[in-house]
Image (tube, rainbow, N blue to C red):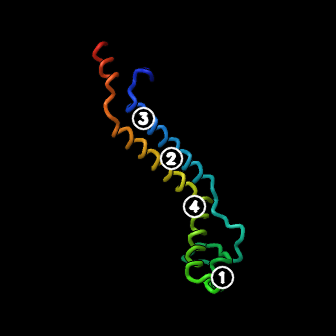
Amino acid sequence: MKWEDTNLQTRLYIIGVIILLVGLGSSIVIYLTAKDVSDNAVGYEVVGGNVYPTEPEDSKIYVRDVELFGGKAAVLADEFRRWFVGLWHGKSLAFTVGGIFIIVFLGVFYVAYHLPPDEESDVRDEKN
């Protein structure tokens, strides 16, 4: 099977599978090599036998000060910002990359599935 002989739908399916394999492979590599160590930890908490770093933004004083200056909307915006920034660090980056590649893979498969049939490839197959 030559690349030139395949129709567009088959090519998109192949490209989608390649995207999925590269994405999941890179996610696994990121997950295995990443560390979830916080640089600005001021202390540590032990919960259920696990040790978790405590950051200044986790304190009630910080949340109260943010609410005092900007209200509840500022507290929600700060929590959203910290969550979004957290997606791009450590092991959660592996899940973010994996999710992005799965969405791209599904998008390529959706486009390939909804393509109209290729008239030229059908005529070429009948001639051969």
Amino acid type, callout 3: Leu
Q: Which residue is mark 1?
A: 62
Q: Alpha-carbon neighbours of circle 4 within 10 Å: few (<14), some, or many (≥20)?
A: some
Amino acid type, callout 1: Tyr
Figure quadrant of residue 109: top left
Q: Which residue is mark 3?
A: 12
84 and 120: which one is in front? 120
Rounded to the nearest whole Å, what is the CA distance between mark 2 and mark 1?
A: 38 Å
Q: Alpha-carbon neighbours of circle 2 within 10 Å: few (<14), some, or many (≥20)?
A: many
Q: Position of residue 33 (x, y in %)?
A: 63, 52
> In percent of the image, x 65 and y 84: which residue is there?
69
Rounded to the nearest whole Å, what is the CA distance between mark 1 and mark 3?
A: 50 Å
Q: Alpha-carbon neighbours of circle 3 within 10 Å: few (<14), some, or many (≥20)?
A: some
> In percent of the image, x 42 and y 45: which residue is there?
107
Viewport quadrant of the C terminus: top left
Q: Is residue 110 above or below residue 47?
A: above
**Residue 24 badge:** 2
Q: Secondary structure at mark 1?
A: helix
